[in-house]
Image (cartoon, rainbow, N blue to C red):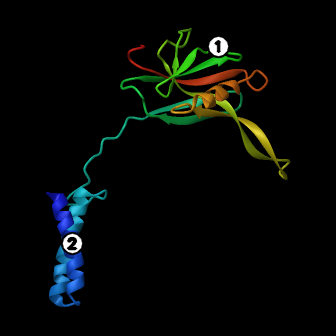
Amino acid sequence: SWSAIRIFCSIARIFIVMTTACSRRGLLACGVVLLLGTLAEGYCGARGSALFPRQPRCVARMEELAVDLGEGAGAIAVNFQPIVDDSEFFVARFPVPFDLNVEPRDGQVVVTKSDDQLREGDIVRATSTFSMRMDTSFGLLPAAKKVKALFDLTGKEWEDVVKAFQENRKSVTNEVVLVIERPPSVA
């Protein structure tokens, strides 16, 4: 197998380099072993070669969304790897204050009660929230400023999820933006 050839070539490289003192035969043997080793690495390793291109790897599907955070915060592009095969993603908006029935389930934030936009079993993947960013005041003095951001809820502690939802108060925003993954069983 190519793994065995690769191991053999690595050992042979070390042996030849150690036992030959730059003779022509030694240089030729080194060249052959280096060539074989390179071909084997091209086949088995992360790199590819002309003779043995890298084998295709299974790449998980990523869902790209453009999410408009509204209220002058602008749109951002985000990528999510689906938790459930064949699920669909969409953006939901709710006026603040909002009533959202969710609970933590297997490390995810799952909707427990259907409404106009959401269905029981939907997964809330992200929420708009506010975070502190450093800015400059009049171009001179550093000042902390609250800015609207998108918070990925995937695998987060429940306390952090609740804090992110609570940042969406009437005093700072008019709407909350949620990224939802809808499994096919919910659709």
- Depth check, mark 2 against mark 1: the one in front is 2
Q: Is residue 79 above or below residue 117?
A: below
| Amino acid type at image mark 2 | Ile
Q: Residue at x 43, y 23 (%)?
A: 88
Circles 2, 1 touching at the beta carbon (< 8 Å): no
Quadrant where the N terminus is found in the figure: bottom left
Q: Residues within 10 Å of mark 2 (few under 14, many from 20)?
A: few
Q: Is residue 153 left or right of residue 97?
A: left
**Pointer 1: what residue?**
99
- Residue 79 percent location from the top left of the image: 49, 36
Q: Residues within 10 Å of mark 1 (few under 14, many from 20)?
A: few
**Pointer 2: what residue?**
11
Q: Is residue 94 left or right of residue 43?
A: right
Residue 69 appears in the rendering: no
Q: Nearer the viewer, residue 64 or 27?
A: 27
Q: Residue at x 40, y 23 (%)?
A: 87
> Which type of secondary structure does the marked residue at label 2 adopt?
helix
Q: Is residue 100 left or right of residue 168?
A: left
| Amino acid type at image mark 1 | Asp
- Residue 176 percent location from the top left of the image: 65, 22
- Mark before the other along the chain sequence, 2 or 1: 2
> Which quadrant of the view contains residue 169?
top right
Residue 68 appears in the rendering: yes
Quadrant where the C terminus is found in the figure: top left
Q: Residue at x 86, y 48 (%)?
A: 138
- Residue 179 percent location from the top left of the image: 54, 25
> Which quadrant of the view contains residue 63?
top left
> Which quadrant of the view contains residue 168?
top right
